[in-house]
Amino acid sequence: MSRHVAMLRVGPIAFRVGSAWKGPTDALRRLYAGYPVPAVPDFTVRLEPQKRWRRWIAPSVAIRGDYQFVGAAPLSLAHGLLAAEMGMNLQMALGLRRYLLLHASAVERDGRAVIMTGHSGAGKSTLAALLSERGWRFLGDEFVLVDLVTGQLRPFPRAVSLKNEAAAVMRAEGAGDRLLFSLDDTPKGRITYLRPDDAAIARMDETARPALILFPRFGDAQAVRLVGPAEVFVRLTQASTNYVTLGEPGFDALSALVRDLPARAIDYPDGDSAVALVERLWAELAR
Amino acid sequence: MLWRADPPRARRLVALDGLSLIYHRPSGMTHVVAPPMPEILDALGEGPADVADIVSRLAARFDIADPADAEAVVSARLAELAERGLVFAA
Amino acid sequence: MTDQPNDDTAGPAFDARASRRGMLMLGAVSASMVVTIRPALAQTNVSVLACEIPVPDPARAGSFVAADGSLVEPNTPGAFPPAPRPLTGEEVKTILAGGPGPAGMDPQAAQAYTRYIEKLQNGMSGFTCYASLQNPRG
């Protein structure tokens, strides 16, 4: 069934993506060109026809793999790349045990990292992509991986999926040559995939120490609010897909993370003020 | 009515800004608690006790700022802890 | 416990803690002092809008859906037949917000299906999709 295969390693995680159609795996290979090719996968994603005959007629792509989401609607073949990306997210969210997984983005400077987390659509992906054009190293926009023993962050630099306005911002920043695929009419409207820059890819195995956590929210007048560690802890349990299943090691890793980490909720009206705010708080708070 | 709790080693406690995180090993559950919860759990470390004795143990260790209705308050807290599986009727 | 370096109380060994009793506020009877961490429901970050809920659950395929969302014997008067296709998360969200049901679907049937969905229990196939609708994230 999976006649086409793409293998890629992102940070510490090796994926095998098999597909009944050529399109999605070709797209993955182009989007992730130059990423290490692993011999043995940690997770497998399979893009399969929803029903046998849907391989050729009105192709309908079902996302299957080691871990599956009961009730997932199939996607059209035009959205095959989205299906592959969602499939990889799903495997991580449901199956990762080696690291504490947080829904967050992160960027690094001088060996220390800012973690940005919050509701989907609040702006953490766009902000991470923007900061990566302004002197920071991109560690990831979807998942932050926390080492259960050392507390260090492992980079997980997957492509960033951007909505229209955010793609335009990145084009204006000069990253147009890395905006590689656009998909129209997805459930989130038109999305464009931004390939991480060469530094992010070359340094994907260099860990970083968390030094600041932000809860960013785009679209309001500029504001900064202190967030206490207990609140940060509770919010992060809700932003983690595996906190509960990890048990005591998860508790130890998360409580250690929040105990000494300065945290702020920030509102900002646009990208430039967001970047300025991050720089100011970094200078003020990061140790 | 006698109350009891698991021994202290059944819980991992991390103190944060005035609140405490408790990982309860037997259940694998995490709770965020405020005073006097950790203090009540510690007081039960001396062995099962009824509400009056728990209040005495607390008074022996701390200056209770609001001693009026102490038994009513501690009873309410014990009921909450019982709901979460952190204390049990002995 | 080691000796307290600045201890200025004379006399035999004693419990250092007892001499330095901290303050304890017991708080109000009615206040709650515990928050228990529950697993985040929308765990997968698969777009909520892409999930589907069959009505009724395949384990009860063939049952009709009464106006209040409960399942009844087929052909019960006033009840609606099983939904012709699963409802997507986006459609359910729209109906719950007071918007129209899917095009081509009897609006009263759509309401009945939505009430059925609201009653879903853990373990039924549509539960995770419905539960993820409740979580503001995703």
Image (cartoon, coloured by chain):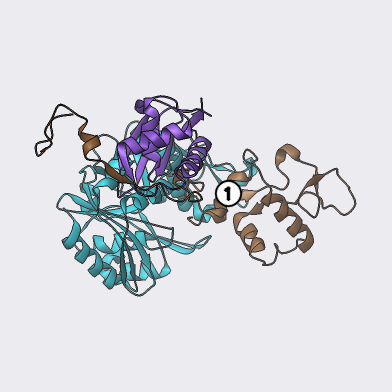
Q: Which secondary structure, mark 1?
A: helix
Q: In the picture provided, is A196 more to the left or to the right than B77?
A: left
Locate residue A105, reporting x and y percent.
Answer: 33, 54
Quarter of the image where one finds residue C1: top left
Q: Which quarter of the picture shows residue A125?
A: bottom left
Residue lying farthest to the right in this orientation:
C77
Q: Position of residue C112 (x, y in %)?
A: 76, 55
Q: Is residue A84 above or below residue C98?
A: above
Query: Residue A15 at what x, y percent from top left?
Result: 38, 39
Residue closer to the observer: C132 or A48: C132
**In the image, which lettered chain appears cyan?**
A
- Say if residue A70 shows up in the picture: yes
| Residue A11 shows up from this direction | no
- Amino acid type of the residue tagged 1 in the rendering: Ala
Question: Which residue is tagged 1?
Answer: C131
- Using residue A227 as the reference point, say whether residue A206 is left or right of it: left
Hue of chain C? Answer: brown
